[in-house]
Image (tube, helix red, strand yellow):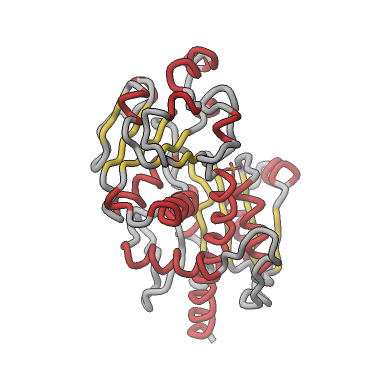
């Protein structure tokens, strides 16, 4: 990594990856996220701290939850929010990514939220912005999705407490999943008891990931698990379309359903980062049933994004002050 995520004062400047954040720094983000969490049905939390600051959402890949929650998070913190319509932007006329960033920076954007299919794009942008400007990774290729890792950890802690006593199984297309990578970074940093990566051999990591065990068979992989997280098959990241598993065969072998969950702990929870393909990696009844915490993940995601925006705001403020 060429750009530090923390500034000289130890404040969060960029959020590119959880790999280089300490447990203490992650706890600070989650403490702040809990501050921004209010029960569904109550008015959403609001704050004025980003008043006079501008957040630009640049999503060069499709998104519902991450994009909508970053937008709502920024608005609930009173920021000016720009959602660039990438397909109607001058990138379609050949403008480079960095020229797009320089153009928006000249309009006094303080925080860029970036999703891109290319590895290294958030870091490249972070390497070229003004000192007071922050970059937040909203999903990078198959490499990293740090706010998803944070919201997944937060959701697990809320239901199960200390992850040191837990067996967590992540099931599905691990090989192409930035969600699995960021969840692994977060959970191993917090000393997860056991972390299993479960899926067909061809969708498991090519190289072993430290702190995890791989299982190519569903029942063995989820047996006795406290937490089971299903992942979507990332069709868009397959080099050859012919390599994509047949959905019915995949569901038969690796699809999560209540019957198959009987082998997990009786109180095991079920997670999914979304978007779901019901009937492929997860049965609809399980996704909507009492074990499911999928909608809570979404709620926690908004709180996490408010937390991250509010923390990098402290960097923006400090650094602007130093520049005056
Ligand atoms: N989990 C997730 O990143 O969902 P979106 O692609 O809808 O943002």
Residue sitting nearer the eye, 2 or 306: 306
- Residue drawn at x 66%, y 52% is 68
Residue 175 visible within the image: yes
- Residue drawn at x 26%, y 46% is 193
Q: Is residue 225 above or below residue 256?
A: below
Q: Is residue 47 above or below residue 213?
A: below
Task: Name the spot of residue 37 as percent of width and height, x first.
Answer: 57, 64
Residue sitting nearer the eye, 47 or 229: 229
Q: Quadrant of the N terminus?
A: bottom left
Return the residue found at the far front.
266
Residue 106 visible within the image: no
- Residue drawn at x 75%, y 44% is 88
Q: Quadrant of the C terminus?
A: bottom right
Task: Name the spot of residue 296 as percent of width and height, x first.
Answer: 56, 50
Task: Name the spot of residue 29 as percent of width and height, x first.
Answer: 45, 66
Ligand 1 located in image quadrant? top right
* Left or right: 92, with 283 as reference point: right
């Amino acid at each position: 990594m060429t750009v530090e995520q923390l500034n000289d004062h130890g404040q969060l400047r960029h959020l590119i990856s959880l790999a280089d954040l300490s447990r203490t720094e992650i706890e600070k983000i989650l403490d702040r996220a809990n501050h921004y969490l209010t029960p569904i049905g109550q008015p959403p939390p609001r704050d004025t701290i980003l008043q006079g600051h501008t957040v630009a959402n640049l999503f060069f890949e499709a998104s519902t939850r991450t994009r909508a929650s970053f937008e709502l998070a920024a608005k609930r913190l009173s920021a000016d929010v720009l959602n660039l319509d990438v397909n109607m932007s001058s990138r379609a006329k050949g403008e480079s990514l960095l020229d797009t960033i320089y153009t928006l920076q000249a309009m006094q954007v303080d925080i860029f939220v970036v999703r891109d299919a290319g590895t290294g794009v958030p870091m490249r942008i972070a390497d070229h912005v003004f000192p007071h400007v922050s970059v937040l990774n909203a999903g990078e290729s198959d490499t990293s999705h740090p706010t998803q890792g944070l919201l997944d950890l937060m959701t697990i802690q809320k239901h199960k407490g200390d992850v040191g006593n837990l067996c967590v199984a992540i099931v599905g297309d691990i090989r192409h999943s930035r969600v699995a990578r960021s969840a692994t970074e977060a959970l191993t940093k917090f000393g997860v008891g056991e972390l299993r990566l479960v899926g067909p051999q061809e969708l498991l990591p090519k190289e072993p990931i430290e702190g995890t065990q791989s299982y190519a068979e569903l029942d063995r992989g989820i047996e006795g698990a406290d937490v089971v997280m299903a992942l979507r098959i990332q069709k868009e990241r397959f080099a050859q379309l012919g390599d994509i598993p047949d959905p019915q065969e995949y569901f038969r072998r690796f699809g999560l359903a209540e019957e198959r969950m009987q082998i997990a702990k009786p109180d095991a929870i079920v997670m999914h980062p979304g978007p779901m393909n019901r009937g492929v990696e997860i049965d609809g009844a399980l996704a909507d049933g009492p074990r499911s915490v999928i909608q809570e993940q979404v709620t926690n995601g908004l709180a996490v994004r408010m937390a991250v925006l509010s923390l990098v705001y402290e960097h923006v403020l400090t650094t602007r002050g130093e520049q005056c």
